[in-house]
Image: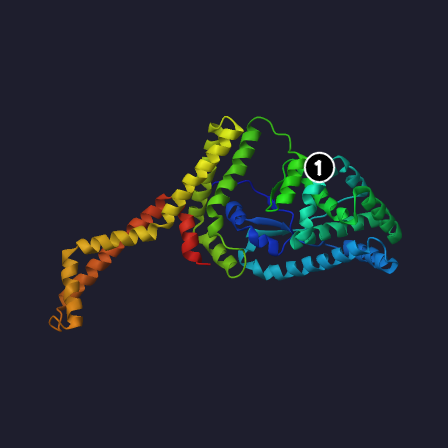
Amino acid sequence: MKSEPQKQVFVFPYYFGPAVARYGTCLLWMGELRVPVPGWLTGGPERSFFEVASRAHKLSHDLNPVFARVARHFILARRQAQDAVADFAPLGKRIMRLTVVGPGTQDSFEALEPLREVCLPFLGATLSDTQQVNAMAVQFVWRVHDTFLESKEDADAVLSTLSSWSKRIGSPDSLLLECVLHRCHALVAQGKASIATDSEPVLAALSGLGTPMLEGDEIENARIAQLSFTLFDALFDEYVPLLQPPHVARLAELMEQKADALDSSRRKCIQEAGRLVQDSPSEEALSSAIQEAVAHLRDEVTSILEVDTATFSQLVQRLTEDKVLWTSLAGLIGGALGSLPAVIPASAAITALVTLGTSALRASRERREALKNSPWSFAYHLRKRARW
C-alpha cells in the first residue's frame, strides 16, 4: 500500500513561475504541486486596475508609485508564468495550475485590524523579494478591482479610499503587505488549508495569526505530518536540483521509474516522525530527539549513497583473492608486455573474462539487494541519475 502524505498542499505565497523551482523536495514528498496562476478567467480585474492606475498617473496621485510598481510586477508575473509553462511541461499533471480569486472587499480588510500590529512587521522583508512582490501585485490588482466595484466604478473614489486607508495603516507599501496578510488570514480561517512555503517572513506572519483549533488525535496527527516532511526535506534537499530544464524532465522520469523507492522513503519518514512525536513527553525532549534522529537518518542515507564504493571495494577484494583469475590475467598482461609467449591460449582469456564477469555480477547483485532493502534507495537513484 502506498503511503499517503496529506494532499492538496498549495505553494505559497508565490504564483506559477520561477519561485516554484525551489519546491523540489515538496514535489517528491507530495507527488504533485498546486500553484495559483497570476490571472483570472475574465479580464475584468485587469481592466479595473489599469483604469485606476491610469487615473493615478494622470493626477500624479500619492499612490501613483505603488500603482506603477504593481503594474510592472503584475506584467512580470504574467510573462514569467507563460515562460514557465514549457519549463514545467515534463511534470504533466504533477503540477496543477489553479485560478484563485481574492483578496476581498474593504470590509474583509477591516477585520484584520487586530492583526496588523503583530504581523505586518514580519512581512516588511518581503518587499525586497521580486517573486513575493509579484504575488502582492497580483493580489493588489484584485483588491483594486473589488474596491472599484464597491465604488460603482469610480476611479477617483478608489484612489480616495485606498489613500485614506494607507495613511491609517502606515504607508502606501502597507497596502501591498496587507494583501499578503489577508491571504494568510484566509488560509488560517479555513482551518484545513495546507501550504508549502520557503518564505520565513510569511511563516512568521502565519505563526502570529495563530493556528486552527485542533483537539486530541488531530494535534498529534498534524505534528506527525509536519515532522514527516521536515525529516524528508532535511535528508533529500541537498540531492534535489532546482526544478529547471533539463532537471525537471529527469526528475519526472525518476519519479515514475522509481516510485516504489520514493514511497519507501516517505514511509520511513512518516514512521520515524510518529515514533518521535509519540515518544517525546515535552517540546524540549522532542527538539532534542529530532536532532538526533536527523543525524542518524543522514548516516543511513550516506551509507546507501556509498553503495557503489562498497561494491567496488568488494569486487577488488574478490579479484585479488582469485588465483585462477590472476593466473589468466598474468598471461594476458605478460603477452602484452612481451615477457611471455605472444600467443595466449584462448582458454586463458575466456577464463579471465568469465571470472571477472562473475565477480562483477555477484557484486552488482549485492548492490541491488542493498538498494532493494533500504528505505533510502531513492536518494541513491536521485544522485546516480542526476549528476545534475
The structure residue drawn at horizontal position 56% and vertical position 52%, both measured from the top left corner, is 22
Q: Position of residue 124 (x, y in %)?
A: 70, 46
Looking at the rendered structure, the kind of residue marked 1 is: Val
Residue 202 visible at all: yes
Q: Is residue 42 left or right of residue 345?
A: right
* Residue 358 sits in quarter: bottom left
**Disc 1 target residue:** 118
Q: Position of residue 278 (x, y in %)?
A: 48, 29
Q: Quadrant of the N terminus?
A: top left
Badge 1 marks a residue whose secondary structure is helix
The structure residue drawn at horizontal position 29% and vertical position 52%, both measured from the top left corner, is 311
Depth order, front residue of 197/99: 197
The structure residue drawn at horizontal position 84% and vertical position 56%, both measured from the top left corner, is 56
Q: Position of residue 38 (x, y in %)?
A: 69, 54
Residue 375 visible at all: no
The outermost residue toward the left is 341
Q: Position of residue 365 (x, y in %)?
A: 29, 51
Q: Is residue 97 left or right of residue 360?
A: right
Q: Is residue 157 positioned above or below 184 on the image?
A: below
Colour mapping = rainbow
Counting labels gives: 1
Depth order, front residue of 118/55: 118
Depth order, front residue of 341/253: 341
Q: Is residue 349 left or right of residue 208?
A: left
The structure residue drawn at horizontal position 45% and vertical position 32%, both measured from the top left corner, is 275
